[in-house]
Amino acid sequence: MASASPKETLLESAAVPLLPKHIDEDDDASLYALQCHGTWLHCGYHLTTSIVSPSLLNLPYAICLLGWSTGMIFIIIGALVTFYSFNLLSLVLEHYASKGLRFLRFQDLADHILGATFGRYFVGPVQLAVCYGAVVGLIILGGQCMKTVYSLAWPNGEMELYEFVIIYGGLVLLVAQVPSFHSLRHISLISLALSLAYSAFATAGSIYIGNISTETKDYAIVGNTENKIFGSFTAITMIAASFGNGIIPEIQATLAAPVKGKMFKGLSLCYTVVLITFFSVAISGYWAFGNGTSSFIIDNFVDSEGNVLVPKWFLFTTLSFIILQVSAVSGVYLQPANILLEEMFVDPKCKPFSLRNVISRVISRSISVMIATTIAALLPFFGDVNALIGAFGFIPLDFILPVVFFNLTFKPSKRSIIFWLNIIIATVFSLIMVIGIFAAVRQMIFDANDFHSPDRLSSSWTLSSLGKTSWKSFSSYLTKNIYSFSSI
C-alpha cells in the first residue's frame, strides 16, 4: 500500500474550530489550525460537557408529564438510542478516516453522504441553529440562577433579571474567546466535576424535602386529554434535548490519529456520568414532588411563598455549581458558530494569532455572544426553549441522521436486524420531531401570557404589547410584577 501523503497525514490528525474553507499545504495558518493531540479522555470530557448539562434538571418534570412508568421508559430509550446512534456516527467517521477522508464537521459529512445541497441547506443551518439556540437557553438559565443567588444574599436588592442575563452573557463572552475546541479540554474536565456536584446536590435536596414534607404526594398526570397528549410530546422532546449533542463530528475531530476506538471509550466515560446523574435526579425529583414538579427541579426548593425549603447555603452552592458549568457548556456549543466566523473573517494567509486575526476573532465572537444575550433577555423561557431545541435540532441530528448515515455508508443487508432497527428509529423519531415542534411552540405561546420563572424567587412575567416602541416593550416586559424577596 502506498504511503500517505503529507496532506493526508495532516488531515488524519486534524481537529479544530479554526477551519478555513480550503486547506492549502503551504498555508501556515491552516496547518496550525488543523493540528491536534486530543486523547479519548479529552473527548470524554467534551462529550460529558455537551450532554450532562443543566437540561437534565428538566427530567423530573418530563416524568411528571408522562407518569412514572412511561417517563422512565422514555429516559431509558433516550439513553440507549443516543449511545447507539452516537457510536454509529463515530463508526461512519472512522470508516471515512481510514480511507483518508476525515470529516471535521457535521455539514461536511452530510455533504459527502447526502449531497452538498442537503448538507449546506439543511444539516449545516439546523446544527448552527440548535447549537446557537442552546447557547441562548443557557444564558437565560445562567442569568436566572445569578438572580436567585443575588436574591438570597440581598433580599431587598433592586437588580432585575435582564441585568443578570446581560452579566452572564459577559461571562460567556470571555469563554467564547478560547481559541479552539481542543483548548476547552481542561474547562470541560472541570465541567464534568461540576455536573456531578450539582446533580448530587439536586438529588440530596429532593430527598431531604421529600422526607420532611407533610403533603401527600400525587403522581397522577393532570390536565385534560388534549393537554396530556401535547404534554407527553413536550416531555419526549425535553428528554431528547437532555440527551442531545449535535456536535459529534466536531468532538471526534479533536482526537489525534489514529482515531479508531477512541470515541467509544469517550462515550463510555460520558454515559457512565449520564447514568449517575440523569437517573438520580429524575427519580428523586419526581418522587419528592409528584405532579407538583417544576420544569426546573431547583424551582421546587423554594415554595410558592418564597420560603427556601433547604438551607440557604445548600441552595446557594447548588446554583453556583450550575452557573459555572453552564458557562463551560456554552463554550462547547459556540463551536459551530465560531467555525463559521473563522471562515468568514479570519485571513488564512496570516498566522492564527497575528494581530489581524486575533482582532477579527475577538470582535466577531463578541458580537455573536452579544446577539445571543439580547435574545436571551427577550425570551426567558428555559424549559420551553429546551423542548423546542430538542424537537427542531437534537432529534434529527442525534436520533435520525446517524442511523441514516450508517445505512447509506455501510449498506447493511435489508434482511439484517441493524438495517430495520435503524429504519424504525429514523421513522419513529421523525414523527416525534414533527409533533414535538408543534407541541413546544404551542406551550411557548401559552407561557408568553402566563410565564413563571424557573426560580420561584421571581414572579410571573407578562409580555407587553409589541406594538409599543421596542425599548418600552422591553422595559415593561422585564420589570412587570417582580416579587420582592423579603420573605426569604
Image (spheres, grey):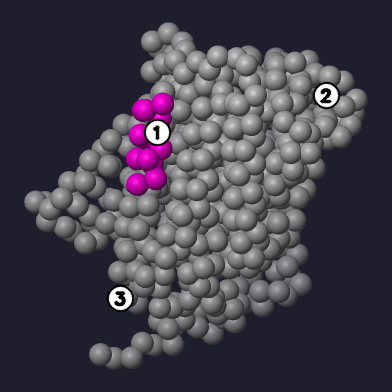
Kind of residue at badge 3: Lys
Q: How many residues crowd mark 3 within 10 Å: few (<14), some (14–19), many (20+)?
A: few
Residue beneath label 3, please?
Answer: 99
Q: From which residue to which does the magenta span run?
A: 68-80
Q: Amino acid at mark 1?
A: Met
> Mark 1, residues whose alpha carbon is within 10 Å: few (<14), some, or many (≥20)?
some
Q: What kind of residue is marked 2?
A: Ile
Query: Of callouts 2 and 3, which one flags the residue occurring earlier in the amino acid sequence?
Result: 3
- Which numbered disc flags the more N-terminal residue, 1 or 3? 1
The extreme top residue here reads: 224
Q: Is residue 135 magenta?
A: no
Separation of residues labelled 2 and 3 (CA atoms): 63 Å
For mark 2, what is the residue?
488
Q: Is residue 425 visible?
A: yes
Q: Position of residue 471 (x, y in %)?
A: 79, 25
Residue at the image point whose x is 56% and y is 54% from the top:
49
Q: Which residue is identified by label 1?
A: 72
Q: CA distance from mark 1 to mark 3?
A: 41 Å
Q: Pick whichever, 311 or 231, lies toward us.
A: 311
Say which quadrant the C terminus sits in.
top right
